[in-house]
Amino acid sequence: MTMDIFAILAEKIIEEQETIIGPIALEQARKVQGLKVDWQQHKVSFEGNKTQILQNLVEQYKTLFGQASVEVCKEAIVRYKTQLSQDQLPQVLR
């Protein structure tokens, strides 16, 4: 079974944030509506518009930590970006 590219992106973003801000990263991810996080299994799933939910995840970190956290998110997904079309990639990650 191939993993959903959106799930991979969300997971990479959360992992990268976690290395910087620790457990707060997970706490913040769980606040994002439509994003289901099972960190024991390292699984992320979506309920709703995946592009919008991914955007909301990045915005959630941005609210707390500003533009620097957006850059961290962009860095986290750089090698996966090409797997999404431009309109699937949230505006904030372009």
Image (cartoon, grey):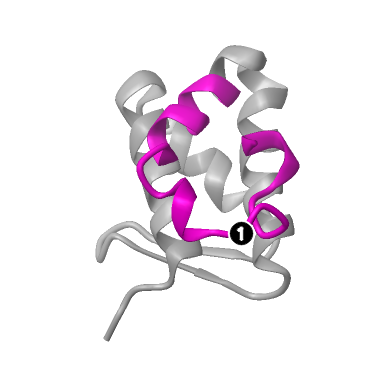
Residue shown at the point (51%, 31%) measured from the top left: 74
Q: Position of residue 12 (x, y in %)?
A: 37, 45
| Location of residue 19 (image quadrant) | top left
Tell me the kind of residue under disc 1.
Ser
- Residue 25 higher or lower than 38, as above or below: above
Q: Secondary structure at mark 1?
A: loop
- Is residue 91 or residue 34 the one in the foreground? 91
Is 72 inside the magenta-drawn segment?
A: yes
Residue linked to disc 1: 85
Magenta-tinted stretch: 70-94
Say how many tags the image has: 1
Is 23 inside the magenta-drawn segment?
A: no
Residue shown at the point (46%, 51%) measured from the top left: 82
Residue shown at the point (47%, 24%) measured from the top left: 72
Q: Position of residue 40 (x, y in %)?
A: 26, 60
Left or right placement of residue 44 versus residue 92 in this view:
left
- Residue 94 higher or lower than 88, as above or below: above
| Location of residue 41 (image quadrant) | bottom left
- Is residue 22 or residue 78 the one in the foreground? 78
Residue shown at the point (40%, 49%) measured from the top left: 80
- Is residue 46 or residue 36 the one in the foreground? 46
Question: Dot 1: within a 10 Å radius of its alpha carbon, few (fewer than 14), some, or many (20 or more) residues?
Answer: few
Q: Position of residue 38 (x, y in %)?
A: 38, 64
**Residue 48 seen by the camera:** yes
